[in-house]
Image (cartoon, grey):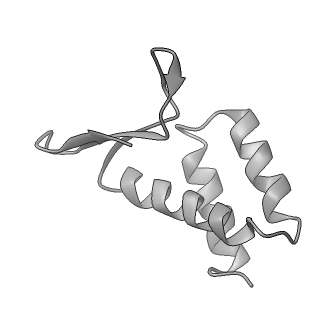
C-alpha cells in the first residue's frame, strides 16, 4: 500500500533528479511500478532524501573511499553536516 499519492512521489523523483544518478532514478521507478516487499521502503527513501534536500545539500551515495554511504547532508546554514 502506498504511503504518498503517485503525483507527490513523481514530484519528489523530479526534484531528486538534481542530485541522484539517472540509474538510481530508473531503479526507483522500476521498484515503484512493481508491487513488492520493498515498495514502501523505496517511497520512504525518495521522500526522506527530498525532505533533506529541502533544508540543505544532499549527496546521494557519494564515492568516499572503498564503500559508498547512503547520504551526505549539509544544512543550508552549514551548522549541521552528517553522513549515513
Q: Position of residue 14 (x, y in %)?
A: 63, 52
Task: Kindly give the residue lying farthest to the left in the view shown.
Answer: 79
Quarter assignment of residue 2: bottom right
Q: Considering the image in quadrants, where does the C terminus appear?
A: top left
Between residues 83 and 26, which one lies in front from this camera angle?
Answer: 83
Task: Kindly give the residue lying farthest to the front in the view shown.
Answer: 66
Q: Reply above or below: 33 against 75.
A: below
Q: How many marks?
A: 0
Picture residue at 22% right of the left edge, 40% below the top: 81
Picture residue at 59% right of the left edge, 38% below the top: 20
Between residues 8 and 63, which one lies in front from this camera angle?
Answer: 63
Task: Kindly give the residue lying farthest to the bottom in the view shown.
Answer: 1
Q: Reply above or below: 31 against 81.
A: below
Q: Reply above or below: 2 against 14.
A: below
Q: Considering the image in quadrants, where does the N terminus appear?
A: bottom right
Does residue 32 appear to the left or right of 20 in the view shown?
Answer: right
Picture residue at 64% right of the left edge, 65% below the top: 41
Picture residue at 62% right of the left edge, 63% below the top: 11
Q: Position of residue 19 (x, y in %)?
A: 52, 37
Q: Position of residue 52 (x, y in %)?
A: 37, 54
Does residue 22 appear to the left or right of 33 in the view shown?
Answer: left
Q: Position of residue 58 (x, y in %)?
A: 40, 41
Task: Kindly give the residue lying farthest to the right in the view shown.
Answer: 34
Does residue 35 appear to the left or right of 47 in the view shown?
Answer: right
Amino acid at each position: 500500500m502506498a504511503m504518498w499519492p503517485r503525483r507527490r512521489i513523481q514530484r519528489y523523483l523530479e526534484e531528486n533528479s538534481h542530485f541522484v544518478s539517472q540509474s538510481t532514478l530508473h531503479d526507483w521507478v522500476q521498484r515503484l511500478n512493481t508491487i513488492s516487499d520493498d515498495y514502501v521502503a523505496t517511497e520512504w527513501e525518495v521522500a526522506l532524501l527530498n525532505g533533506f534536500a529541502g533544508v540543505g545539500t544532499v549527496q546521494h551515495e557519494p564515492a568516499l573511499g572503498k564503500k559508498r554511504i547512503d547520504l551526505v547532508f549539509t544544512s543550508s546554514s552549514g551548522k549541521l553536516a552528517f553522513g549515513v
